Amino acid sequence: MNDNRKNIILIFIVLVGLVLLVRLFFIQVVNEEFKRAADNNAVQRLVDYPYRGLIYDRHDKLLVYNDPVFDLMVIPRNVQIKDTTLFCNLFKLTKEELIEKYEVARKYSQVKPSVFIKQISNADFAKIQDYLIDFRGFFIVSRSVRAYPEPIMANALGYIGEISKRRLEIDTTKYYKSGDYIGIGGMEAYYEQTLRGTRGAKYRLVNVRGVEKGSYKNGEFDTLSIPGNNIISTIDRDLQKYGEFLMNGKVGSVVAIEPSSGEILAMISAPSYDPNLLTGAQFSEQYAKLNADTTKPLFVRPIMAMYPPGSIFKIVQSLIGMQEGVFNENTIFPCNKSLVNCHVHPNPVNLEGAIRYSCNPYFHQAYKRIINQELSPNDFTDSKLGLDKWKEQVLKFGLGQPLGVDLFNERGGQIPGSNYYDKIYGAGRWRYRTIYSLSIGQGEMLVTPLQMANLAALVANKGYYYTPHLVKSITGDDDIDQRFKVRNESGIDAKHFDIVHEAMIKAVSGTAARAVMKDIVMAGKTGTAENPGVDHSVFIAFAPAEDPKIAIAVYVENAGWGGRAAASTASLMIEKYLKGQITRPALEEYVLKGEFIY
């Protein structure tokens, strides 16, 4: 009986042993999951961050480069700080902050590295690097942030920052990890995939205490980071810098375009900020200050601000009317101030005179002919059909919808049609007399500064434009997006632009006399956009008139007549671009002083 019991126990022990041996064989040889789990406990992965692509201006002058910064990493289990006071002084921490940061890292992992202090500057790192050997458990990982040789173009360039939780959640590519930097706003965001490069990784063996024991499998799985592609922008750095100089202390924007290509030569948003503020460890603090600033320096006015175009829209009305055949260059209308107010000028005038002297009553009557073409015997239906046909034509000028510039958050402005007025007044309850303010670019019509600069380019080209864009070329890619090479036609015959060009040349010497240049013929049109309080000053132009190299739009908020602030600024910008220098210091002083309404 006892022998049988011994045999049963022995058999049981052998069976258990066999089960354990089989299980051990399965774990160590067959199942890779356990092997990977063991490797994860012994291998640390360190990210090799790539250098972000640089951004240059059209003449290869640097606009954005990378500045090295350093993250202080910690492995909690290894931490030994002999002199807490010295540590706190070196890293500008209080004792409470030190304890708090350590607890956060410890809760994350005792043996895995995590960021203890982010973005230590190169100068600060030089002060502390000799002391790091005295603080076990801490080491440095190099990163890079953006830096700017000139404090310009902040709104168009954008900035980089740590990726948000929301962005991580919607990242379908799964490329980004917590703690990664990403382009936010401007070109940095739009060309993120071009600029960011590809991360690399290095793997190292550590023991149970987190002490490094060398590379993992002799670096077999290490990968090098791949730098991002560089961008050559369309911007002229000197022109951009000068434009920001002129707009200092003002609110508004300046956009300059090369008509023959759609390349943006300058994009100024005022007020702006020094882009170097949004780099490094002080990013959050500086961003909060800028975001709270009531002048809205983070607001990208060239593509997001919307204003009534004012009298510059009379150019569009002239071209549509001639194309429709409802009037021509010889058509005369009296300056009837009972229709709409106007200033003193020769009366009556033909179309050239109406553009030159910016006659409001002329365009009140001309626009009525465009809208009411007897398309229907019913007065309301006639206005409704005429307005919708007119809107369709206006949209071809690049107004009323986003142009498609290579920046996010571009707004489209507003060109109202019959549906808009039906919602406000009700179907059949509005007529031409309800909407006549559109004739002179006022009322419910809204445009962006970029759209008005593009309009100047379209007029310079006699009927077409290329979609405005900020990138000229990209490293590793010989071509830009093909949509920037497509001609967008306005549907207006080129012959109709001759009288408009002639009138715009004469308009400069009439309503914007101080903007006249002796040796450069500029074609322009002033505007005064209505606004509660002081009106906005508006001006569009192109030059040289006979062979346009630059088209420009200037908006200066609350600066009154377009012939003052806006025209003077545009004239200086054109001279700077075409001649490389300013020969009218008195005009420059006038613009810088900014006393336009006195």
Image (spheres, grey):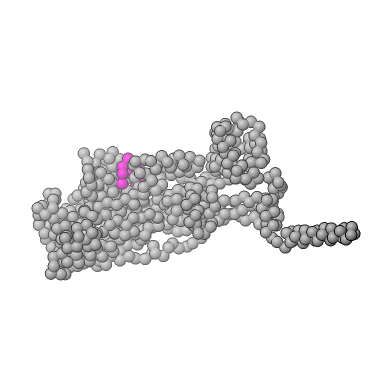
Q: Is residue 250 magenta?
A: yes
Q: Which quarter of the figure has residue 31? A: bottom right
Which residue lies at the image location 69% right of the left edge and 60% below the top edge?
32
Q: Residue at 54% across / 48% down in the picture?
A: 179
- Residue 34 visible to an observer of this rendering: yes
Towards the viewer: 418 or 545? 418
Figure label count: 0
**Residue 45 percent across, percent down from the top left:** 63, 51
Residue drawn where x is 75% and y is 60% of the image:
23
Q: Which residues are magenta?
A: 243-252
Give the side of residue 199 with respect to residue 379, left or right: right
Quadrant housing the N terminus: bottom right
Residue 457, position as x, y percentages in the image: 30, 58
- Front-lying residue, 437 or 596: 437
Task: Name the residue at the bottom extreme.
Answer: 376
Q: Residue most toward the front?
A: 1
Q: Picture quarter containing residue 431? A: bottom left
Question: 441 or 231: which is nearer to us?
Answer: 441
Task: Name the side, left or right, on which 279 lies relative to 395.
Answer: right
In the rendered structure, the answer to whether residue 463 lies left or right of residue 328 reads right
Q: Please report the residue visible at 34 percent of the width from the left and 41 percent of the height from the top.
A: 294
Q: Position of residue 377 (x, y in %)?
A: 12, 69
Q: Is residue 347 visible?
A: no
Q: Is residue 554 magenta?
A: no
* In this picture, residue 355 sits left or right of residue 39: left
- Position of the C terminus, as image quadrant, is top left
Residue 585: image location, x then y, percent: 29, 41
Q: Nearer the viewer, residue 159 or 502?
A: 159
